[in-house]
């Protein structure tokens, strides 16, 4: 199925609606032009929902989940005649949360039930690539209804799901569990909020801030007034955020909301009790900076790679990366990311001609080095883990039995993602078999040379 893009803000349409105003018996009232807006409904992006608005707009959401509305409209969404819910105010991004009064995130029971039903009706049963409610499902749902608040929801929804999929010619499918549906929806909420944001803060101090929000909700960035303070923290799937600029004892705490439309706002306070103020900002497609410094990209001070396979337990189940160097054209490769643990990077770089980096006085006994190399379209990995007096060496690539796969090398956004990428044990060391890597390694502009 074609991937459905997640639109992050309202899009102004070129269509204008003319409505009359005036009064007093005027025979030629002046028209008021109401701009038609385009919003999006997401669990993942949902195609095939019928919608109606209070201004008279109606239709079916498109491949990206888009629908049309006028500012101030209420909006209701349907599968056939099954009402999912109504929102009193249509916005640029709508979700099952938007149509359940009082809901704030995916854990609300009614929200969860809507997400379960939507995801279970997806025509290819893979909501990660977008949810498609086929026209046949919509036809089969004519004259049907479902109470998403009912204590008998599971029984009723399962029977209705079976009927709709059967009548629409889809393969039989089970009603997804609450945990699975919540996890899928939470991923969408966090991924939609992920990206670069810039803004300003005012109060007892003033300045600018710039952050990068990762798909897991982690935040790194910087706040700038007369000094540069690094920002770390988290954004929840609800959009609620707590971050700290500078020291956790003498810095500033920022609390607020990051809307799905890309608008951020909230309050901040100095942790020493000397006052605070408010902040605001917006999402941007351009990597921001504070005082000329790039905010840490995708992972901040450390990135964690989760391990699986034969030696995962012996290696502690994960690797923590704190030092990075990205090079173009190094030793004949197009791109090379050298990722290591504390204290090793200078040693490694000093062994590469032209780096001229002096090694530190001491080198940790325990450490990790992962070299991810790209030549053309081919990716190779060589990695070594030193732990408790043992040395584990792994490789993958064109020259080995295990080819490097499930790796995304994104030098534009300065990150490499391993999605259960497999490496094999090399000869003459303590490695015993296959190892899988899952996680993201990242670097900053300052790591490039």
Image: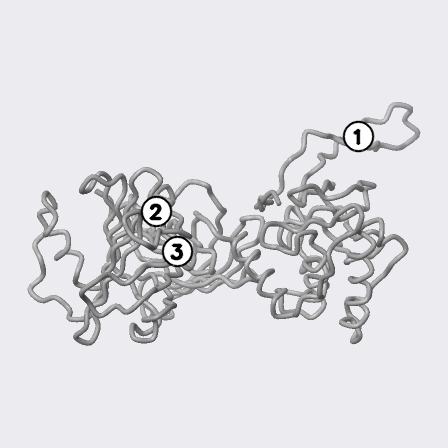
Q: Is residue 102 visible?
A: no
Q: Alpha carbon of mark 2 to alpha carbon of mark 1: how far?
A: 47 Å
Left/right of residue 54 with respect to residue 250 in the rendered view = right
Query: Which residue is disc 2 drawn over?
Result: 414
Left/right of residue 263 with respect to residue 92 in the rendered view = left
Q: Which mark is residue 418?
A: 3
The count of marks equals: 3
Q: Quadrant of residue 385?
A: bottom left
Considering depth in this image, is 213 or 280 the residue closer to the camera? 213
**Residue 407: x and y, percent?**
39, 51
Q: Quadrant of residue 183?
A: bottom right
State the colouring used for the structure image.
Answer: one colour
Q: Which mark is residue 160?
A: none
Q: Is residue 236 visible?
A: yes
Q: Alpha carbon of mark 1 to alpha carbon of mark 3: how far?
A: 52 Å
- The residue tagged with tag 2: helix, strand or loop? loop
Left/right of residue 66 with respect to residue 253 in the rendered view = right
Q: Earlier in the sequence, mark 1 or mark 3?
A: 1
Q: Earlier in the sequence, mark 2 or mark 1?
A: 1
Query: Which residue is disc 1 drawn over?
Result: 18
Q: Alpha carbon of mark 3 to alpha carbon of mark 2: how far?
A: 14 Å
Please state, as top left, top right, bottom left or bottom right, where the N terminus lies in the image. Answer: top right
């Amino acid at each position: 199925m074609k991937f459905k893009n997640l639109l992050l803000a309202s899009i102004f349409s070129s269509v204008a609606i003319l409505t009359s105003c005036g009064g007093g018996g005027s025979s030629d009232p002046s028209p008021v032009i109401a701009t038609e807006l385009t919003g999006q409904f997401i669990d993942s992006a949902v195609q095939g929902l019928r919608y109606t608005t209070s201004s008279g707009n109606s239709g079916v959401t498109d491949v990206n989940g888009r629908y049309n509305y006028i500012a101030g409209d209420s909006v209701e969404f349907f599968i056939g005649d099954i009402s999912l819910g109504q929102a009193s105010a249509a916005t640029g991004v709508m979700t099952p949360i938007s149509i359940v009064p009082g809901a704030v995130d995916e854990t609300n029971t009614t929200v969860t039930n809507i997400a379960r039903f939507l995801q279970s009706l997806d025509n290819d049963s893979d909501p990660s690539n977008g949810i498609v409610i086929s026209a046949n499902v919509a036809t089969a749902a004519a004259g049907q209804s479902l109470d998403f608040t009912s204590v008998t929801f599971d029984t009723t929804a399962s029977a209705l799901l079976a009927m709709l999929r059967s009548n629409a010619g889809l393969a039989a499918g089970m009603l997804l569990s609450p945990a699975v549906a919540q996890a899928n929806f939470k991923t969408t909420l966090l991924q939609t909020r992920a990206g670069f944001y810039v803004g300003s803060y005012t109060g007892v101090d003033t300045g600018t801030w710039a952050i990068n929000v990762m798909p897991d909700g982690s935040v790194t960035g910087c706040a700038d007034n007369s000094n540069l303070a690094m920002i770390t923290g988290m954004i929840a799937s609800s959009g609620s955020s707590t971050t700290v600029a500078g020291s956790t004892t003498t810095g500033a705490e920022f609390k607020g909301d990051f809307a799905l439309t890309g608008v951020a706002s909230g309050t901040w306070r100095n942790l020493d009790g000397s006052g605070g103020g408010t902040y605001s900002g917006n999402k941007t497609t351009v990597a921001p900076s504070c005082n000329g410094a790039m905010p840490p990209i995708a992972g901040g001070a450390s990135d964690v790679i989760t391990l699986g396979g034969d030696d995962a337990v012996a290696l502690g189940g994960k690797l923590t990366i704190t030092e990075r160097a990205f090079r173009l054209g190094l030793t004949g490769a197009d791109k090379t990311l050298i990722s290591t643990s504390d204290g090793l990077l200078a040693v490694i770089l000093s062994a590469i001609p032209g780096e001229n980096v002096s090694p530190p006085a001491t080198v940790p006994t325990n450490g990790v080095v992962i070299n991810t190399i790209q030549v053309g379209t081919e990716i190779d990995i060589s990695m070594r883990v030193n732990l408790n007096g043992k040395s584990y060496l792994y490789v993958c690539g064109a020259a080995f039995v295990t080819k490097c796969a499930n790796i995304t090398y994104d030098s534009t956004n300065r990150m490499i993602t391993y999605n259960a990428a497999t490496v094999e044990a090399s000869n003459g060391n303590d490695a015993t078999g296959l190892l899988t890597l899952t996680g993201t390694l990242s670097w900053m502009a300052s790591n490039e040379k």
